[in-house]
Image: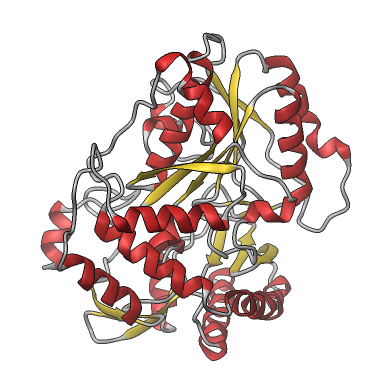
Amino acid sequence: MKNFDTNHILHPYAPSIPSSDMQLVKSARGVYLELENTEKVIDGMSSWWSVIHGYNVPELNRAAQEQLSKMSHVMFGGLTHEPAIRLAQTLLSITDESLEHIFFSDSGSVSVEVALKMAFQYYSSQNIPNKTKILAFRNGYHGDTLGAMSVCDPVTGMHTAFEGVLHKNIFAEAPVCMFGEEWDEKYISDFKSKLQEHHREIAAVILEPVVQGAGGMRIYSPIFVKRVAELCREYDVLFILDEIATGFGRTGKLFAYEYAGIAPDILCIGKALTGGYMSLAATLASKKVMQGVEANGNVLMHGPTFMANPLACAVANASLELLLSSPWQERISKIQTQLASELSRCKELGIVKEVRTLGAIGVVELHEDVDLGWMTPEFLKRGVWVRPFLRLVYIMPPYVIEERELSHLTNAIYEVIEAFEKR
């Protein structure tokens, strides 16, 4: 079976014939993946940050089974259904009150595409044709579809192969002020100068609040987010926040923008929305945005086949109910305290540049790129699944992880990095 996979199935950011041995997962429960050899390993990645409740959750299983007995899918054009309505009610109730409209899509990248289209249509519908650019940030990452790629860092964003075909946008320097660091207005100077110079052609600014994810797992000051929001208002530019990775408690707040005390014009969410059970995302917008989009009789021009898929919406409802009724803040606080304490000893290693933590995010940045082909089996030997990239060894575990399981993960990180340094 694995031989067929190796010869025919493409995997993320990998050659068609993978250079490293692929692991076959037989089942998963709690925070454990069961591999083909019956070995169980702790998943430190939450399957790319989405499986916040762990695997094989009875409440989510039940929600999926009950919805399957009714309908798994129905088109959203001209029709609606109770799971989507319930989900929209919950999402609009837990986000800022200025966000009044919601567009369901089938992946985080598509939610970004929808946000960009909202921004462009907002101005074009009002006969303001010159606002055709997006101001984004270095080290930012927003997805792999064409529009999303155009607002990822053009150098470190993994999309240089498409540079010649992407829409040309404007990029400001990445935030450099650390979380908790004393604020200096110089930190916003590059962004401010680019906004001042180009605001007449900029439709929107897009930003991952407080944590830049796949562009480098960089954790920065919420004051930066606040100042960006203030400057967007000053220069009549829409403000898009990408909370696909940070939403639903990952940073210690339900949404990371809460640290800054601001609200976006458009908000993108996904990943943990269904507890990692299936792909579902959403783009939330203010009344101001939708009134602008629909000026002069226009409508938002987007409509995925699986928009507001009932099965995904039903599971998302169960996931949100499970999250909001749980002591998630206490759990995240304990995880952060343990990560900060136990990963700190990695600083003793000469190969380690920096250790940073926030909420259920732990990052060890090295002075050199990791060797994925070497590190993956080393982590598996220690009973954990960790997937490093660039110079980063990081974990984003499920919120239900127990103290001893998290210690197992952090110990493995120290041991593997120590062994990597001594190679």
Residue furthest toward the bottom? Answer: 404
Q: Is residue 406 left or right of residue 186?
A: left
x then y, percent, for residue 345: 70, 78
x then y, percent, for residue 213: 55, 52
x then y, percent, for residue 302: 33, 31
Q: In the rendered view, would you say 117 is above or below 47? A: above
Name the colour scheme: secondary structure
x then y, percent, for residue 84: 34, 53
- Between 54 and 62, the residue placed more toward the observer is 62
Residue 246 visible? The answer is no
| Quarter of the image where the N terminus is located | bottom left
Residue 415 visible? The answer is yes
- Between 245 and 301, the residue placed more toward the observer is 301
Q: In the rendered view, would you say 60 is above or below 229? A: below
Q: In the rendered view, would you say 75 is above or below 375? A: above
Q: Is residue 24 left or right of residue 138?
A: left
Q: How many marks?
A: 0
- Between 376 and 276, the residue placed more toward the observer is 276
| Residue in the picture at 64% in, 57% down | 367
| Residue in the picture at 67% in, 16% down | 198
Q: Is residue 74 left or right of residue 227?
A: left
